[in-house]
Amino acid sequence: MLNTGIFIFNDIETLDLCGPLEVFSAANFVSENKVFNVFTFAKNQVPVTTINGLSINPSFDFHNLPQPDILIIPGGEGSKKVVEDKKTMSLLDDLFDKSRFTFTVCSGARIAARLGWLKNKEFTTHHTVNDEISTLEPLAIPCKDSRYTDNGKLLTSAGVSAGIDLSFYLLEKISGEVTAEKTAKYMEYTRVDKQDL
């Protein structure tokens, strides 16, 4: 199984987290083979509150965390504080190095930019954050009209709901079109093309 770890923090955007979690969990539900071990983790194993007031208990913290094969970094106002936390950023950098895929959702791109992951790489993010990402990493290549980007190991999505579309894209890349379509049908979700922003 692929460890699919979603990093969570206070003032995270709720759908940035819940969208990818639902896609990879639903893929397990519709498949004969359970491919994704989906879990959340935080700096500390204490409840995290989303920007909408939802309280979430992380399954792990950095000390007991299984190495994610797929590392998911959502966004939200709280990402501004994360990028100022040197220890957390260093630990995320280590997880990125050992991951098979890492993707950011929405303003989670702040973290990727600050850590240098976007240097000479294409990115998309929430439309209100594009200029900030370019300031954090001047060598990043903005794709403002893209729903998501694929740089190989590192992928990015535009704002909020776009994390669902990137999750489906990566699901198909890993498990194939049939599984992706079965998952979309189960979720009653119409998939969106890369350029449909």
Image (cartoon, rainbow, N blue to C red):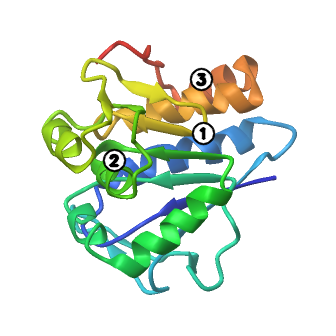
Which marked residue is nearer to the observer: mark 3 or mark 1?
1
Secondary structure beneath disc 3?
A: helix
- The reply to whether callout 3 and callout 1 are in contact (CB within 8 Å) is no
Q: Which of the marked residues, 3 or 1, is nearer the chain's N terminus?
A: 1
Q: Secondary structure at mark 1?
A: loop
Decide which of tag 2 and tag 1 comes sooner along the chain: 2
Instruction: Name which of mark 2 and mark 3 comes first in the sequence.
Output: 2
Q: Which mark is residue 98?
A: none
Which of the two marks, 2 or 3, is nearer to us in this view? Answer: 2
Q: Which mark is residue 109?
A: 2
Q: Position of residue 31 (x, y in %)?
A: 79, 36
In the image, residue 144 lies at what x, y percent?
24, 23
Image height check: is 80 above or below 189?
A: below
Q: Quadrant of residue 77?
A: bottom left
> Which amino acid, by three-letter code, is at mark 3?
Lys
Residue in view at x 32 percent, y 57 percent: 114
Instruction: Determine crowd level at label 2: few under 14, some 14-19, many 20+ residues with C-alpha closer than 10 A.
Output: many
**Tag 1: residue type?**
Lys
Q: What residue is shown with label 1?
A: 153
Q: Amino acid at mark 2?
A: Ala
- 32 vs 62, left or right, is right
- Give the distance between the C-alpha atoms of the residues marked 3 and 1, in whole angstroms: 27 Å
Q: Of helix, strand and loop, which one carries label 2?
A: helix
Residue 61 to residue 16: above or below: below
At 73% from the left and 32% from the top, the residue drawn is: 174
**Could you tell me how far apart the alpha carbons at marks 2 and 3 are, in whole angstroms?**
29 Å
Mark 1 is surrounded, within 10 Å at the Cα level, by few (under 14), some (14 to 19) or many (20 or more) other residues, namely few
Quarter of the figure with the C terminus: top left
Residue found at the very far right of the displayed protein: 32
**On the picture, is 95 further left or further right than 37?**
left
